[in-house]
Image (spheres, rainbow, N blue to C red):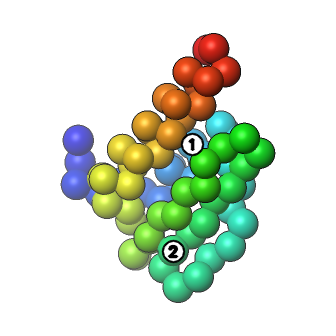
Amino acid sequence: MPSEVQFRDLRRLLEHHGWELTRVKGSHHHFRGKGRQPISIPVHKGRVKAIYARQVDQAIEELQRQSGG
């Protein structure tokens, strides 16, 4: 896995799965969605560390397990 990913790609993935960007405070972008855990992602120069991308993947997998799909 790369050490960093593009924020725009991660944002598209989150929005596709029902999260929306609710606020930005400093470098932290906060996402929320009905029935979804809130996610905060620090962004620097348009990049996100891989650990946050893995957390997003885990949140999506958990959402899919809960919905049965």
Counting the numbered discs, the total is: 2
Marking on residue 63: none
Disc 2: CA contacts within 10 A as few (<14), some (14-19) or many (>=20)? some
Q: Is residue 15 something one can see in this rendering?
A: no
Location of residue 68 in the rendering, given as x and y in whole percent from the top left corner: 63, 14
Of labels 2 and 1, earlier in sequence is 1
Location of residue 19 in the rendering, given as x and y in whole percent from the top left corner: 68, 48
Q: Amino acid at mark 1?
A: Leu
Query: Within the image, what quadrant is residue 23 found in?
Result: bottom right
Judging by the rendered image, the residue that carries numbered circle 2 is: 28
- Secondary structure at badge 1 equals helix
Disc 1: CA contacts within 10 A as few (<14), some (14-19) or many (>=20)? some
Which quadrant of the figure contains the N terminus?
Answer: top left
Query: Within the image, what quadrant is residue 36 found in?
Result: top right
Location of residue 46 in the rendering, given as x and y in whole percent from the top left corner: 44, 69
Q: Is residue 45 above or below residue 31?
A: below
Judging by the rendered image, the residue that carries numbered circle 1 is: 13
Instruction: Please report the residue visible at 49 percent of the width from the left and 29 percent of the height from the top.
Output: 61
List the single residue furthest toward the top. Answer: 68
Q: Is residue 38 something one can see in this rendering?
A: yes
Is there CB contact under 8 Å for labels 2 and 1?
A: no
Q: Is residue 67 above or below residue 59?
A: above
Q: CA distance from mark 2 to mark 1?
A: 17 Å
